[in-house]
Amino acid sequence: MDAEIKKEILYDLQKSLEILRIREKRDLEELRQLSDHAIEHVASYKDLDVISVTVLIYSIYKTYSCIGNRDYADLLNELELAARSLEKNQFGKYNSSIKRLYEIIRRCSSKTKEHLQDVMHASRIKKGTLLLSKGLSIGQAAGLMGLSNWDLQQYAGRTTALEEGKATVPVRKRITTAFKIFGVR
């Protein structure tokens, strides 16, 4: 596992633990924010371990209200074990913990596959928005990411991505070039 990816996964696991240690009403909002943060990593790294942890966090967020007390305690224990195992580079134990975490979530909801699709869709949208900020049109960015223009447009309209595109050629030079092309002096 790449050191940077390991660092991001550890951050996500430890932040999850920090949020979930004491069950409070604000946990749901904090989990949503962490899930959004983790989705950005999926768009950046496209790594299976990152995807796995991101889907896990999103699944915890979606099933939070129906997780019973016993499962909640098991969830905390497994998150701690996963984080410790990853810190010690014990990848076998880490993978086993992630698998058990998914089993705990499935006890409450069988919609984990839908959560994976949601995370992947959100990651493609975020990546498409990044392409917009690099100067691609909505049609080009949506096509590259396998999205409809509408999907990308809905998200980009709520962000500043469309405004972030920077002109790399000064205006005077563009005008001069246009005049040359059309033979205007």
Image: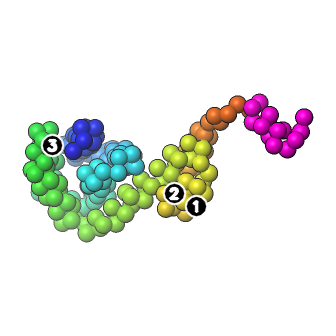
Q: Is residue 67 visible?
A: yes
Judge left or right: residue 163 versus residue 33.
Answer: right
Q: Position of residue 25 (x, y in %)?
A: 30, 47
Quarter-of-image position of residue 69: bottom left
Q: Is residue 43 above or below residue 116?
A: above
Q: Position of residue 105 (x, y in %)?
A: 21, 61
The structure residue drawn at horizontal position 11% and vertical position 55%, both measured from the top left corner, is 96
User: Magenta stretch containing residue 174, yes or no?
Assistant: yes
Q: Amino acid at mark 3?
A: Leu
The structure residue drawn at horizontal position 48% and vertical position 54%, both measured from the top left corner, is 125
Whether label 3 touches label 2, CB < 8 Å:
no
Q: Which residue is mark 3?
A: 86
Q: Main secondary structure of the magenta part?
A: helix
Q: What stretch of residues is rendered in magenta?
A: 172-185
Query: Disc 1 or 3, which lies upstream in sequence?
Result: 3
Q: Position of residue 50 (x, y in %)?
A: 28, 49
Q: How is the image coloured?
A: rainbow
| Mark seen at residue 150 | 1
The Cα atoms of the two marked residues, 1 and 3, are separated by 40 Å
